[in-house]
Image (cartoon, coloured by chain):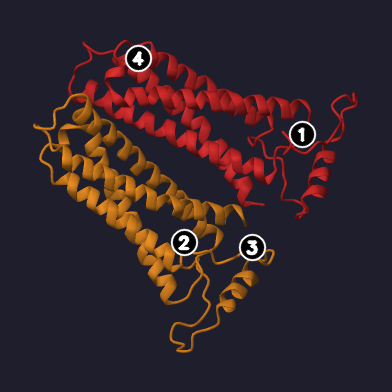
Chain colours: A orange, B red
Amino acid sequence: MSASHPSVHPVDAVPPPATDAAAAAAEENPMPRGRMKDVQGMPGTPSGLALRLFQFAFSAVALSVMASTSDFPSVTAFRYLVVASSLQSIWSLSLAIVDVYAILVKRSLRNFRVATLFAVGDGITSTLIFSAACASAGITVLIGNDLNDCTENHCTRFQTATAMAFLSWFAGSPSFLFNFWTLASK
Amino acid sequence: MSASHPSVHPVDAVPPPATDAAAAAAEENPMPRGRMKDVQGMPGTPSGLALRLFQFAFSAVALSVMASTSDFPSVTAFRYLVVASSLQSIWSLSLAIVDVYAILVKRSLRNFRVATLFAVGDGITSTLIFSAACASAGITVLIGNDLNDCTENHCTRFQTATAMAFLSWFAGSPSFLFNFWTLASK
């Protein structure tokens, strides 16, 4: 956490005005004023934390529903979905914890190194979960609509896991785009 | 094309210095100097044109290889790949023509409306082709590795089409990221 900007000593009971954090950030990295707007959805904001929790919840549900079927290891795409959703849930949970910390101690996470790390990590995990969701969707549609073979397969569970992985991607893309935007607007 | 900035009259035979275009752009949209760097790979540059041509070539090959198999209509994901790669090739060819025009008449395409249009279009087409490639990859791997059923199917053609769709996405993502970066850094 050495990359975050301390804005107030943690034991100080008086909440500082919000401008202190921005002033401290501007002092450390001189840049034009008015660029560091605290847009909701960025890391360190309550909406950013909500996005992380949604990502974590959806990917954890996708993981558990898919892992609860007995025949998922026979299909490569379903094994890949399990791996990708585990990775997404670990990543989202870690960043949710970082967000909670940043909100509690009022530290700004909008630093170039931190934004780069978050943007790269979000880009990788959201690409992985999206590709896994698409591959599973292709196979679920093949089993359900093209082969009409749902009696022998757990179509409902496969569809639920796929839908949850897509929802996790929907919740993850804004995080990536916000971090990339923060990076680009510096 | 009313959104691009004219920097020189088309019938003028003398090539203008490159700074004229930047000066004209700065005059029309006043903004801090040093932000409008002409990064290679952005629309209107030779590298941007090369990216467009690669996207078009790969998606056209994916489309023709997939459409040349007799049994692609029986699988939803393969039909989706045909649709997505047609859309990608039409979009990339159109933007390649716009890039050629911008290079020939030396117009700058880095205008907010144009960059928004390009970023949204690139985002949509690259998401579509990536999801189609992932769905096809899931099914190709299911047929080839999980079911070992390549003797009855055109595995090689399916794999080629999938690989070409992935390559088209690889060539398309930098265009999207560059446009999004241009948008964010304004």
The circle drawn on residue A41 is 2
Q: Nearer the viewer, mark 4 or mark 1?
A: 1
What is the chain identity of the residue bearing mark 1? Answer: B
Mark pair 4, 3: CA separation: 50 Å
Q: Quadrant of residue A26?
A: bottom right
Q: Is residue A29 visible?
A: yes
Under circle 4, the secondary element is helix
- Image quarter for residue B97? top right
**Camera-side mark, 3 or 1:** 1
| Label located before the other in sequence (4 or 1) | 1
Q: Are marks 4 and 1 on the same chain?
A: yes
Q: Chain of mark 3?
A: A
Q: Tell me the distance, in whole angstroms, between the alpha carbons under discs 2 and 1.
A: 36 Å
Residue type for callout 4: Arg
Marks 3/1: CA–CA distance: 29 Å
| Residue identified by numbered label 4 | B157
**Which of marks 3 and 2 precedes in the sequence?**
3
Residue B57 image offset from top left, x and y in percent: 53, 19
Q: B93 left or right of B68?
A: right
Check the image and report above or below for B4 versus B81. Answer: below
Label for residue B107?
1
* Residue at position x 33%, y 58% in the image: A54
Q: Chain of mark 4?
A: B
* C-alpha separation, residue under disc 2 versus residue under disc 3: 16 Å
